[in-house]
Image (cartoon, grey):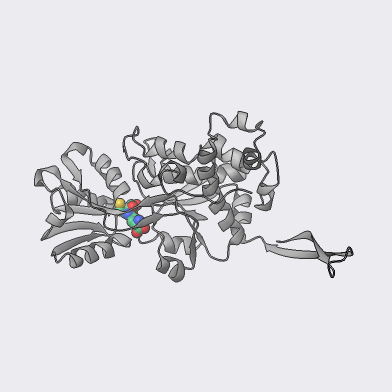
Amino acid sequence: MKRFFKRTFTSGLLIGGAVAVAVAAAAITYERYDTKTLKRTLRRDAVHCGVSTGLPGFSAQDEKGNWSGFDVDFCRAIAAAIFNDPKKVKFVPLDAKERFIELSKRKIDVLARNSSWTMSRETEYYLHFAGVSYYDGQGFMTPRARNRTSALELDGSKVCVQSGTTTELNLADYFRANNMKFEAAIFPALEPMLKAYESGRCDVLTADVSQLYALRLKIGKAAEHDILPDVISKEPLSPVVRQKDDDWHLLVKWTLFAMINAEELGIDSKNIDAAMKSKKPEVMRFVGTEGDYGEWLGLSKDWAARIIRHVGNYGEVYERNVGTNSPLGIPRGLNQIWSAGGILYAPPIR
Ligand SMILES: N[C@@H](CCC(=O)N[C@@H](CS)C(=O)NCC(=O)O)C(=O)O
């Protein structure tokens, strides 16, 4: 469907310093293409969201089949914005290797699966990373019994790593740069990698630090495993969409920005009803009592308020799933709002 938006601009022209002012009104017609993804999502009444196969705190299923986690909540936020119903999501578990291919093949609408934003992933698979939802970095986990305190003590180690990840290349770079030898035990799937580590077939396991926390929890006996302090790479984790899918890309991107902006503005799931009555201009634009920002996205005026009511702001989602009072217990660190000492900085809704 093609939608046309007509906007009129008025420009004033001052002639020769005289009092005569000529006013020219120009009507400019913008064209916006509604691409297939939003239409299909609306038709089937559900967002198809690619997540990892099972990382506690990020995307995991309980015995009743209910999904929870940081990535899961992001999928629910998109559904809340579109349908006013966070349950209208179908979760599609994907391992590292298949995730971008399945997204390209339209098996899913969006990938929210601890995926690092890199140049080659955008250019080779024709994708867009919508915005950083979690600033991560790669680290190492070792059994406490091995008594390691730094990654620089890992010379000669056998290292468990998952294929199809940025982790594999960073591992090789790090050992080479530090003149250390290693043997990689490479696994295409998570479970066999974890089993190999648990049974002592590897001396160390490497993954993004957030995922090490999740895996340590999965193993049980958290106290028996150390996450070393060294962080050897940048892993900007981001939701991913296909290229040439502009309206969908905007929707996913602004869902994330809405969650971050809400935290900065002090809007959360508990005070959202009061926020709907606020007279503060920034809050009014956010909740849709002023302006038509949601409508330009193809949604309702209260699209952002729906996200916060049903899912919460960024900080609520972080704390619930991975924060210091959750079983994972990861401090906010870089993932704190910029005005509170972190680097989360979302463009404003205006
Ligand atoms: N952020 C890195 C690593 C992501 C990744 O796939 N990590 C593995 C190791 S923990 C994982 O999440 N596996 C879960 C799965 O395959 O379902 C990337 O984008 O390549």
Residue 101 image offset from top left, x and y in percent: 43, 64
Left-right relation of 308 to 149: right
In this rendering, the answer to whether 249 lies above or below 261 is: below
Which residue is painted at 70% across and 41% down in the image?
290
- The answer to whether residue 87 of the structure is visible from this angle is no
Q: Nearer the viewer, residue 118 or 113?
A: 118
Q: Nearer the viewer, residue 127 or 312?
A: 312
Left-right relation of 235 to 223: right
Which residue is painted at 22% across and 63% down in the image?
174
Left-right relation of 222 to 106: left
Q: Quadrant of the N terminus?
A: bottom right
Instruction: Answer with the quarter of the image where residue 100 lies.
Output: bottom left
Give the residue at the far right of this rendering: 20
Instruction: Answer with the quarter of the image where residue 323 lies.
Output: top left
Q: Nearer the viewer, residue 10 or 283?
A: 10
Residue 12 image offset from top left, x and y in percent: 81, 63
Which residue is painted at 77% across and 65% down in the image?
28
In this rendering, the answer to whether 301 lies above or below 297 is: above
- Ligand 1 shows up in the quarter that is bottom left
Residue 63 image offset from top left, x and y in percent: 36, 36
Q: How many marks?
A: 0
- The answer to whether residue 295 of the structure is visible from this angle is yes
Q: Nearer the viewer, residue 235 or 282?
A: 282
Residue 65 image offset from top left, x and y in percent: 41, 39
